[in-house]
Image (cartoon, rainbow, N blue to C red):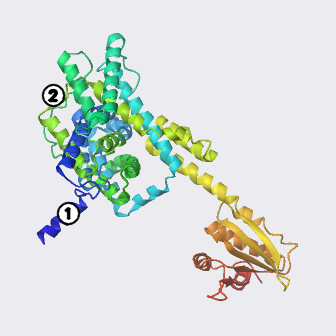
Amino acid sequence: MAQALLARFADSMSLRDPDAPLTVGRVRIEILSGLTVALALVPEAVAFAFVAGVNPLVGLYAAFIVGLITALIGGRPGMISGATGALAVVMVSLVAQHGVEYLFATVVLMGLIQIFVGIMRWGKFIRLVPHPVMLGFVNGLAIVIFLAQMSQFQVPGSAESAGHGMANGQWLSGAPMFMMLGLVGVTMFIIWVMPRITSVIPAPLAGIGIVAAIVIGFGLDVPRVGDLASIQGGLPPFHIPMVPFTFETFQIILPYALILAAIGLIESLLTLNLVGEMTNKRGGASQECVAQGIANTVTGVFGGMGGCAMIGQSMINVKSGGRTRLAGIAAALFLLVFILFASGLIEQIPLAALVGVMFMVVIGTFAWNSLTIFRKVPMMDGFVIVLVTIVTVMTDLATAVVVGVIVSALAYSWNNAKRIYASTHETPEGAKVYKINGPLFFGSAEGFSELFQINDDPSLVIIDFEGSRVVDQSALQAIEAVAGKYEDAGKRIQLRHLTHECHELLSKAGHLVVDSDDDPDYELAVDYGVKTGILGGH
């Protein structure tokens, strides 16, 4: 019994992946991949803490707690979560107006909202994101990651007050700039060539290690992690947010919590899809929502700024060979070790090495094939790709995805609105039959009404929906309007071949009477309307 329970637990944790069994070699790959991710997490967490206007340890604690919990119970092994810039830019105004304690309370509420979304299984709606939106998303993300590295080419300390990635700091120049660019280039070359030499060590980790050894060994004067801030600290302390537990407080934090929850889930679920495409995994959206919610709720009571999935670090992990939960767990634990014991060593790592790793992530993330498919896809799809890319860079990932989905939905509705048409013929009894083709919904309702020649039609008209589908209330209203016009002209209509689902919609609305269950042939809508007074009959 105990072995069976342990086996079920291991399966649920995905520590035993059929595609990546935990052999000694696999464990080594997972741990080294986690170490690589942890090294890349440090400057990101510190920089995003600066953006939010909080202490760097607040960002590091969030990266540790959110990363650990989502690695343990998240919806996709291989994903990495932590403090992100998309959330930090929303948090900055809250911290500036009300202080960091209100941020902690907001993160707790944010987590509870995400748990609710997961329990309601609303994560499945990520399926509504079209492929062109995904292409624009990854392209915009690659550009955002690239631009985020620009602050590392500024004089240490000058970008801190300006905000991460902003161009108000003082740029490096002369020999320091060339030294920085050279080390970035060396790191990228090592990452590119290392897989051709050996797969024992993940290429990004090799790049960081070799460049760090060169810089430390030769005593090169280049920006290092320690120039951003000290990462030394203790264990995250349990801390109930020191805010008044009043309705006024709730009114303050609720808008921020809703926005943060939405941004965090959208970014996390898109990362889940992206990692799933790379690892051939599916599902787990609702589980990821719950995991993100639990992680943020816990983070809020342990002095963290909250977080969500990090696409850049997830790409590093996957490309370094991380396939199970062990890599994410290792990354979080390594990060904690850095904070507790190895801050002095980690602070010596040159920023150029980490920038080189992120530049390779940019190259690997950008969908280069999207530049060549514009002549092969519909014009609207190409427009959506470009639109989502631009909005991602100008605003944030969540806004870009919402805009892309709305534009795609409108384009789809418009295209379907033009598809409705009718073919006509007369029966031996002298009735005219309209065979409707195409979906009948709010977008095509007007076109449907224009199909009929009411004044020229005979006394009996049959509308056959065998090639159509009644979708919504606008369609019902359009059918009723046509029936009313025929009534005013003293003529009768019959509706045929509606699906049972459409029949239920019409019946619930009180429009139609069924002639036969075997043959879905419905009586005149106006007959029923006249009897009940709905259509104003006498």
Residue 9 image position (x, y, % from top left):
20, 63
Q: Residues within 10 Å of mark 1 (few under 14, many from 20)?
A: few
- Give the residue at mark 2: 345
Residue 534 image position (x, y, % from top left):
69, 78
Question: In the image, is 489 to the left or to the right of 239?
Answer: right
Which quadrant of the figure contains the N terminus? bottom left
Q: Is residue 513 above or below residue 388?
A: below
Residue 37 image position (x, y, % from top left):
26, 39
**Type of amino acid at the residue the image marks with label 1:** Phe
Q: Is residue 36 above or below residue 109?
A: above
**Type of amino acid at the residue the image marks with label 2:** Leu
Q: Which mark is residue 9?
A: 1
**Of the pair 238 and 340, the residue shown nearer to us:** 340
Q: Residues within 10 Å of mark 2 (few under 14, many from 20)?
A: few
Could you tell which of marks 2 and 1 lies nearer the N-terminus?
1
Question: In the image, is 519 to the left or to the right of 393?
Answer: right
* Residue at the (65%, 62%) spot, across then down: 442
In the displayed orientation, state which residue is furthest to the front. Answer: 197
